[in-house]
Image: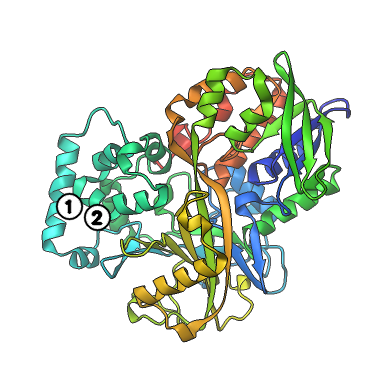
């Protein structure tokens, strides 16, 4: 049912998954006209696809799965499902609403389509490959050795009998669920590589969002059940997120989803302004009334009035944009928020050569089937390596080359961030050489992509974030959504759900924002079985 009247406007800051979802929902369910301002020159935010000489890069990797039927249906409404899962076979994906895509599409003939991918991820540690999630199989125990396996078992039992109380840090959270030995083996070093600080300085809230409910016990049950039941289901409601076996993926990468959504929004009368940054927000009483917007190419500014405002910009920048009317204590908390930044080095290779890369899963084009390889080794800085060929063969111009992304975690302005593009390319090549996965002759091309404020951090002033939330929630027409908008390490489906819930509130004339903040905090959105 559409809202009466057509004079109202929603100003949306950011054209990532949250901002575009909010705009699409407004055009679908109301007569409120969305006006989006995006500071970059492309839509999609962290979920966009970057093109380099015919090869496409997925920034950070985006598996399209969700425990939310609403999100799964939304994706398939934008891009229809392909007709069969990866690799063919008799399995038919168990979709929530199969009647929406009765025939599917042929991804070889049509550009618009979602592929069904079988998840393959591994951890590289001690010069060996371990399946991810860590499978407690005979092969894993043989790789770890009897002494370490015994230690893992005993420390897990100890953590269950004598848990750390209260949990004051991410380290406490992980030890309580996996035991000290497994924590030290597979979690501590990688987590500290991602965040750049010791685990004892990170809030346990991060663990509660990302791995709640997943434990060694559940991994054992998953390993046992996998012996008897093949997981071809796309319905994820009753699966821990880290144990999901299949996912959807747009033919040309995640950016295709958001480019198509943007096209539909514009077609319905919404506005999308790229290269425009919101620099100021004016308040009257308990409402935002206008935004000051700067054209990044010309430097000119203009003022845009609105009835509703959605923000996906970093909270630190949002509070700055509100100016001196914000209470000093709230401004101090905002200035103390910390972000972790991200560099992807794309390398085009003739092949990946190391024999131990295959692990029995090498395909005919001489590279492993992994989507991600998590690099746990301490003598290299790279954190993860994506093999783009495996996300979708359509991301790679020449199918007889290997297109990989080496992912580095850093802080904006630090030594790694300041390294030149040529310096980053040399570092990436040297690290693959050190791992023994390539020779210099294998390297054909490369590019470097820097992404600031990729990960909102759960340290710094985060423990006082409630002061910011209490303040902004009083502004009845302002909705904080998205990863940076909520300073929460959301997946894209959580960002979308927050946007959908915000529009729900507008349609229902609901003032409280509790249900928006509850997304990815309620049990159904955690990585936990109901």
Most foreground residue, 226 or 103: 226
Q: Which residue is mark 1?
A: 152
Q: Is residue 61 above or below residue 175?
A: below
Q: Which residue is mark 2?
A: 185
Q: In terms of secondary structure, where does tag 2 sit?
A: helix
Most foreground residue, 336 or 311: 336
Which x, y percent locates residue 492?
A: 57, 46
Q: Are marks 2 and 1 in contact (CB under 8 Å)?
A: yes
Count of numbered badges drawn on the protein:
2
The residue furthest top is 285
Q: Quadrant of the N terminus?
A: top right
Q: Quadrant of residue 313?
A: top right
Drawn side of residue 524 relative to residue 16, left or right: left
Which x, y percent locates residue 100?
A: 68, 52
Most foreground residue, 362 or 115: 362
Q: In terms of secondary structure, where does tag 1 sit?
A: helix
Please give the label number shown on residue 225. Answer: none
Q: Quadrant of residue 214?
A: top left
Most foreground residue, 396 or 25: 396
Q: Residue at x 73, y 45 (%)?
A: 38
Q: Residue at x 46, y 40 (%)?
A: 457
Sequence-wise, the earlier of marks 2 and 1 is 1
Q: Quadrant of the C terminus?
A: top left
Please state which of the two labelled residues, at mark 2 or mark 1, is closer to the viewer.
Answer: 2
Q: CA distance from mark 2 to mark 1?
A: 9 Å
Which x, y percent locates residue 32?
A: 81, 32
Q: Is residue 408 above or below residue 519?
A: below
Q: Residue at x 48, y 86 (%)?
A: 441
């Amino acid at each position: 049912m559409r809202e009466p009247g057509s004079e109202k406007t929603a100003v949306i800051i950011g054209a990532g998954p949250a901002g575009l979802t909010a705009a699409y929902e407004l055009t679908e369910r109301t007569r409120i006209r969305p006006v989006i301002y995006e500071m970059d020159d492309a839509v999609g935010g962290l979920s966009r696809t970057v093109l380099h000489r015919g090869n496409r890069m997925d920034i950070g990797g985006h598996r399209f799965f969700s425990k939310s039927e609403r999100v799964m249906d939304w994706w398939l409404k934008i891009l229809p499902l392909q007709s069969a899962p990866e690799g063919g076979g008799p399995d038919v994906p168990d979709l929530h609403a199969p009647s929406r895509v009765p025939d599917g599409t042929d991804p070889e003939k049509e550009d618009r389509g979602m592929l069904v991918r079988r998840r393959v991820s591994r951890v590289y540690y001690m010069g060996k490959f371990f399946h991810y999630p860590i499978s407690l199989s005979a092969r894993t125990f043989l790789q770890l050795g009897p002494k370490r396996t015994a230690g893992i078992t005993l420390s897990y039992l100890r953590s269950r009998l004598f848990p750390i109380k209260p949990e004051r840090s991410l380290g406490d959270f992980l030890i309580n669920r996996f035991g000290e030995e497994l924590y030290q083996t597979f979690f501590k070093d990688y987590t500290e590589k991602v965040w750049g600080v010791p685990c004892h300085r990170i809030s346990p809230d991060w663990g509660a969002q990302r791995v709640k409910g997943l434990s060694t016990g559940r991994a054992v049950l998953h390993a046992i059940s996998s012996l008897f039941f093949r997981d071809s289901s796309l319905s994820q409601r009753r699966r821990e997120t880290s144990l999901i076996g299949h996912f959807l993926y747009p033919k040309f990468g995640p950016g295709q989803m958001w480019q198509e959504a943007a096209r539909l929004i514009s077609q319905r009368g919404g506005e999308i302004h790229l290269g425009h940054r919101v620099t100021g927000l004016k308040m009257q009483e308990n409402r935002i009334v206008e935004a000051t917007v700067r054209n990044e190419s010309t430097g000119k500014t203009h003022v845009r009035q609105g009835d509703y405002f959605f923000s996906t910009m970093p909270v630190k920048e949002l509070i700055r944009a509100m100016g001196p009317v914000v209470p000093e204590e709230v401004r101090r908390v905002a200035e103390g928020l910390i972000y972790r930044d991200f560099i992807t080095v794309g390398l085009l290779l003739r092949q990946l050569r190391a024999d131990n890369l295959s692990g029995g899963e090498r395909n005919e084009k001489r590279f492993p089937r992994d989507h991600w390889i998590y690099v746990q080794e301490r003598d290299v800085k790279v954190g993860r390596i994506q093999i783009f060929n495996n996300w979708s063969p359509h991301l790679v111009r020449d199918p007889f080359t290997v297109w990989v992304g080496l992912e580095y975690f850093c802080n904006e302005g630090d030594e790694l961030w300041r390294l030149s593009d040529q310096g980053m390319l040399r570092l990436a090549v040297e690290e693959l050489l050190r791992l023994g996965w390539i020779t210099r002759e294998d390297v054909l091309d490369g590019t470097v992509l820097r992404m600031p404020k990729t990960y909102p951090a759960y340290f710094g002033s985060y423990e006082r974030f409630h002061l910011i939330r209490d303040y902004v929630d009083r502004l009845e027409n302002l909705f904080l959504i998205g990863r940076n908008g909520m300073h929460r390490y959301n997946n894209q489906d959580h960002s979308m759900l927050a946007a959908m819930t915000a529009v729900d509130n507008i349609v229902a004339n609901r003032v409280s924002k509790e249900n928006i903040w509850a997304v990815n905090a309620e049990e159904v959105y955690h990585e936990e079985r109901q």
